[in-house]
Image (tube, helix red, strand yellow):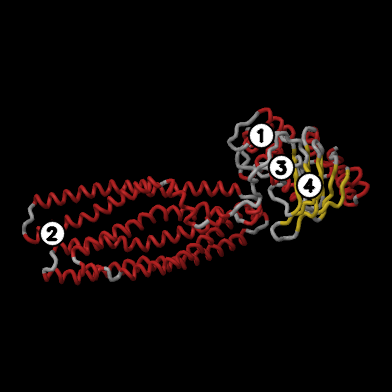
Amino acid sequence: MTAFALIRPYFRENLRRIATGLLFLLGVDALQLFIPRLVKHAVDALADGSASPQLLARDGGIIVGFALFIGLFRYGWRHNLIGTSRRVEKAIRNDLFSHLLTLDAHYFDATRTGDLMSHATSDINNIRMATGMGIVAITDAVVLGGAAIGFMAWIHPGLAAMALIPMPFIVLSARIFGKKMHARHKAVQEGLAAITEQVREAVDGIRVVKVFGRGEQVDARLRALSEDYVRRNMRLVRVTGSLMPLMIFLSGAGTAIVVGAGGKLVIQGAISPGDFVAFISYLGILTWPMMAMGWMTNLVQRGKASLDRLAVIFHETAKVAEPKYPATLPDVIGRIDVDAVSFAFDDAREVLKEITLSLKSGERLGLVGPPGSGKTTLLSLLVRLYDPTRGTLRLDGIPLPHLRTPDLRRHIRFMPQEPWLFSGSIAENICGLGAPSDPEKLAHAVEVAALTATLAGFEEGLNTIVGEKGVMLSGGQKQRVALARTLYEPSRILILDDPISQVDTRTAHQMTEAIFADTTRSLIIASHRLSAIRPCNEILVMEKGRIRARGTHDQLVQTDAYYRETWRLQSLAQEIEEANHA
């Protein structure tokens, strides 16, 4: 997708407003061009002695009337053109966010949040300026400048030709400077994105920064990025700061030529004093379009650089693609089959290798293994956060890529390992931001997640605001809220990634008992606590992306050394904890 192809639809949607704004702008330009003719008439009348108070009052009154209409028309074009640029800004920002929501985990794994924030703010603001004042500058440069040159040529072609001697230099300068500005604007935006990401990361991890005394390091890093950003801006300023003075100088050179040559023509009687004053007025009108060419070049190149950056994002597509002809799931049974599945992130080494398993409806499957063994990755494949590089995953016999992801995720509820919470209330985090809650489902989810006693200790109960990322809650409380969110909507399949890692043994036992009590759905649970997966029909022991052993709890205690030793150590730790509480 090219930069201009990206913005074309937004212009089509606002074509009527743009046309109306241009009509008002042309009206302003026409009235500005007619005023020098009135001045010429008055000056010539003064020069030949035919002027009268009535004539001067009439011409002055007409000029005042024109000024009034210029003000009204100027409001009209600002309302329509600048208003359109604001609507384009809103539409692009909304479309950018909507497009980001269509991208999958692959994209966000490789993209910094600060870059996206810069795209959504600074880049879109540059596009707004280019589509608003950029259109105005282009129109004035073409229409007002062309008409002013025409009136000047009508007064005296030779003098007009001399006044336009600097014009080729203006066009050449705009072309040369424009290329440099485009590249340097892009570099500035990239520098801003780096600063935004650094600030976001530092604020996001402020507790780690303070606890480990990394404030000076973080500050030094931001200062280095700020210095680099200043250097990039100074390289840009050397171009933009040179262009406008150059335009003013060339415009002034044209005025100097007119004063010298035009004054001589007045003395010789080739043109009247009124023509000379009108010519100077038209040259003054031409000064703005000549200066606008430099400003326009700056705005357009800045906007084009930002458009190029946004076009890259809009060109991105999800690797987890939606099917063209999706299969339907009328009655979900809850069977999952994984057939020789392997997975690798991009060109990196495989993190899953030849995984095969089958989960029948209503069965419980447990996953255990050391960190990095591939448990979380396997669970992510089951809900299509990623697609496998080899092999097939099926739900009720249907390959997952044949199902629409919203349909799939409606039947499979997944609790990620990280208990991410939004900065709303507990109820909003469980039921959904802005979504109406179902009291019965909410009460059930709270009970299974062992949140009842916790909520009783909060003055606002379910309406307690948890803060950014749930900062007001403990790790165990956040984890239980995340579990309640997963359990709120009923589903045929429940997938839990280490759901009790941050809660005490007693609470963990209460939670797992409640989870396993529901026999109407299939369950896949990964946990480092073997007590959480002990009741499962089958347990898989994973290591380095492979299944090293499988069986029930009793079988694995007898056959697998890793499982047996882990169970022994955890049982000993639990006995010590219970003895301390006794």
Percent from the top left, x then y, of residue 160? 23, 67
Residue beneath disc 4: 338
Question: Which numbered mark, 1 or 4, is in the foreground of this view?
Answer: 4
Q: Which residue is at the far right? A: 558
**1 or 2: tag closer to the N-terminus:** 2
- Disc 4 marks a residue whose amino acid type is Val
Foreground of the two, 146 or 303: 146
Disc 2 to disc 4, how far (Cα)?
A: 92 Å
Q: Residue at x 66, y 36 (%)?
A: 430
Q: How far apart are marks 2 and 3 (CA)?
A: 83 Å
Q: What element carries label 4?
A: strand
Q: How far is disc 1 from disc 2 in space, using C-alphas?
A: 84 Å
> Would you say the residues marked 2 and 3 are in contact, meaning their CB atoms lie under 8 Å apart?
no
Q: Which residue has dot 1 on it? A: 458
Q: Mark 3 points at which residue?
A: 415
Q: What whole-number distance in Å separates the C-alpha atoms at marks 1 and 4?
A: 44 Å
Badge 3 or badge 1: first in the primary sequence: 3
Quarter of the picture containing the C terminus is top right
The count of marks equals 4
Label 1 vs label 2, nearer the camera: 2
* Residue 259 sits in quarter: bottom left
Which of the two labelled residues, at mark 3 and mark 4, occupies the earlier sequence position? 4
Q: Which of marks 1 and 4 is nearer the N terminus?
A: 4
Relative depth, front residue between 186 and 21: 21
Q: N-terminal of the two: label 2 or label 3? A: 2
Q: Position of residue 182 (x, y in %)?
A: 46, 64
Write the residue at 29% across / 52% down. 26
Q: Which mark is residue 43?
A: 2
Check disc 3 and give the amino acid type: Met
Depth check: give the residue in front, 303 or 388. 388
